[in-house]
Amino acid sequence: MPSEPLISLRDVHLAFADNPVLKGIDLDVHRGQAVSIIGPSGSGKSTILRCITGLLRPQAGTLRVADTAVHALSSEAEFIALRKRVGFVFQQYNLFPHLSVLENLVIAPRKVLGRARADAEHEARQLLAKVRLDHKADAYPGELSGGQQQRVAIARALAMRPELILFDEVTSALDPETVGEVLTVIRELTEEGMTCVLVTHEMRFAEDISDVVYFTEHGRIAESGSAEQIFQRPRNERTQAFLRHALGEGARRYYPPAPDVLSNLRSYSVSV
Ligand SMILES: Nc1ncnc2c1ncn2[C@@H]1O[C@H](COP(=O)(O)OP(=O)(O)OP(=O)(O)O)[C@@H](O)[C@H]1O
Ligand SMILES: [Mg+2]
């Protein structure tokens, strides 16, 4: 493992007005790792991701993505440079409804990266094949299921050739039967060595794919460790209580993959 983390947060503090939300976050992500952030609602998970994208600026502490000091970004140009390197996929897919699936993938590489149309289109088609939606290139987002739209959103993030991708509860708004196909795509990305940071409520998935898991509570990292340690031998009693709840009753539901996902792919669709 390289000694320099790709993402590094040190004692990051952030408050909204007088509401302290991050109270000293230390977090490292190395190149090629899949890192999950789990924890109760309101504990600061999305805020951490938004800080990594530069959308929110911490009031104290340092935050680096490779050689970029994200806590000290001062110009629009630096911010744009960061956004090129960091892909972000949200719960809401936010595709452009008036553009075809293909055009949704082509627009940013052309406008932001200045790539030629033929190049951008060629790569967009490859990415659509990767998320198994090559047959939907000419469809409009409104004609797709939630899971398909979310896979387009992932392909769109990949079209910018990011160095890392952040996923914030990307399956939370999906119908249960389409969760598995989206998780399968994320799993494949992690297997290919894409650096991924996931905020997720899909605990079995997090356990399965993560190299490192962080458990947040009240704006602090209450515990972090390997997936095996956090899920099998949590030390912190708050982690234990959270996992007891999250892996309880509802977690045993299983949703089969949608028909257009190859049947030999494993599917992760355990929900809490
Ligand atoms: N833009 C904002 N303005 C004011 N307060 C905010 C803002 N965004 C988040 N907060 C507050 O910060 C805290 C942490 O929010 P955050 O969205 O990071 O939690 P989370 O762990 O992602 O929760 P969830 O699991 O519900 O998504 C919450 O108390 C929230 O109300
Ligand atoms: Mg959140």
Image (cartoon, rainbow, N blue to C red):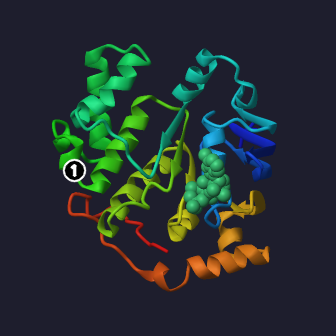
The one of 234 and 211 positioned closer to us in this rendering: 234
| Quarter of the figure with residue 107 | top left
**Total count of labels:** 1
- Residue extending farthest front: 18
- Residue 65: give x, y in percent of width and height: 68, 32
Residue found 21% across the figure and 46% down from its top: 142
**Which image quadrant for residue 112?**
top left
Identified at 35% across, 49% down, the residue is 150
Expressed as whole percent of the image width and height from the top left, the position of residue 3 reads: 77, 38
Does residue 250 sit above or below 139 in this rendering? below
Q: Is residue 186 left or right of residue 241?
A: left
From what the image shows, is residue 105 above or below residue 78?
Answer: below
Kind of residue at badge 1? Leu
Residue 212 shows in this picture: no
Whether residue 215 is visible to the viewer of this picture, yes or no, is yes
Kindly identify which residue carries mark 1.
144
Instruction: Tell me if residue 187 comes above or below residue 110 in the rendering.
Output: below
Taking the image in four quarters, ligand 2 sits in the one at bottom right
Q: Quadrant of residue 36?
A: bottom right
Residue 148 horizontal side relative to residue 205, left or right:
left
Q: Residue at x 74, y 40 (%)?
A: 8
| SS label for mark 1 | loop
Going by the picture, which residue comes out furthest to the bottom?
Answer: 249
Alpha-carbon neighbours of circle 1 within 10 Å: few (<14), some, or many (≥20)?
some
User: From the Cβ of disc 1, is ligand 2 less than 8 Å away?
Assistant: no
- Give coordinates of residue 173: x percent, y percent: 39, 60
Q: Position of residue 168 (x, y in %)?
A: 52, 51
Q: In which quadrant of the rendered image does the N terminus lie?
A: top right
Judge whether 256 appears above or below 145 on screen: below
Q: Looking at the image, which residue is at 65% across and 37% down?
A: 56
